[in-house]
Image (cartoon, grey):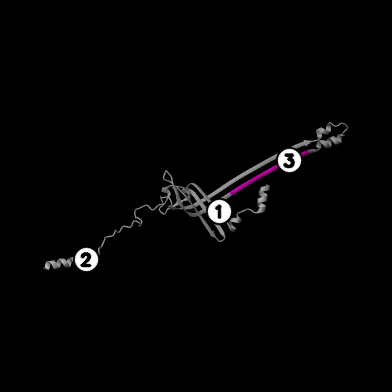
Amino acid sequence: MKIVKQLLLIVFLLCQTNLVFGESLWDDKAASFFADNKAHSIGDSITIVIEESSTAYQKAGTVLDNKSNSSIGPLASNLPGISKFTQFLSTATKLNEADKFDGKGTTQRAGQLSAKVTVKITKILDNGEYEIEGNKEVFINSENQKIRIKGTVRPKDIDENNTVLSTYVSNAQISYSGTGPVGDSQEPGILSKVLAFLF
């Protein structure tokens, strides 16, 4: 009888306990300590560090030299009835004409662009390289500046910070445009445009 009571007590205690299930400590969404965090899929972001500079120099020169000499002496000696004095005067009289034009022109242009633009991987090529494209627009102090970049990036050129220098972007198309007081000041004036058109 005592054994039966003990069994009933054990069953009763078991019924009072809650079911407990073990949960995994692994979080599928957590970043791996060993996985490569570089961009490698379409839609992933890459920061392009733009450091571009260009210098163009052009020089042109033209020299034209045109000279002509003429004398009326021989013509006067063939005229009948002309005096010796007139012949002497005409012989001493010469016509000299000289035209000379020396034109030189020099054009020099230099530009430098430094910026950071975060782009997206738009396509993965068969050779494993990434086509990237992105733009950045900044509006400050009445200045609207736009930067656009497009090109191809090799995975090995992406560093641990997910950035790439613009010098490593192949087939790079980088455009920069700005509007506002500073941008307008770069345009030549009306008089300069007229003179450039005429000359």
- Residue 153, above or below 142: above
* 81, 11: nearer the viewer: 11
Tell whether 73 sits left or right of 154: right
- Residue 4, above or below 75: below
Q: What secondary structure is found at the residue carrying circle 2? A: helix
> Closer to us: mark 3 or mark 1?
1
Residue carrying label 2: 15
Place of residue 194 in the rendered image (x, y in percent of width and height, measured from the top left): 67, 50
The numbered dot on residue 98 is 3
- Residue 49, above or below 100: below
Question: Was residue 119 drawn as part of the magenta stretch in this picture?
Answer: no
- What amino acid is at disc 2? Cys
Tell whether 105 sits left or right of 4: right
Q: Specify start and end residues of the magenta stretch as a single range.
A: 95-108
The numbered dot on residue 177 is 1
Q: What secondary structure is found at the residue carrying circle 3? A: strand
* 103, 7: nearer the viewer: 7
The residue sitting at 64% across, 46% down in the picture is 105
- What amino acid is at disc 1? Ser
Of callouts 3 and 1, the N-terminal one: 3
Place of residue 184 in the rendered image (x, y in percent of width and height, measured from the top left): 60, 56
Q: CA distance from mark 3 to mark 2?
A: 125 Å
Q: Residues within 10 Å of mark 3 (few under 14, many from 20)?
A: few
The residue sitting at 53% across, 54% down in the picture is 146
- What amino acid is at disc 3? Ala
Furthest residue toward left: 1
Q: What secondary structure is found at the residue carrying circle 1? A: strand
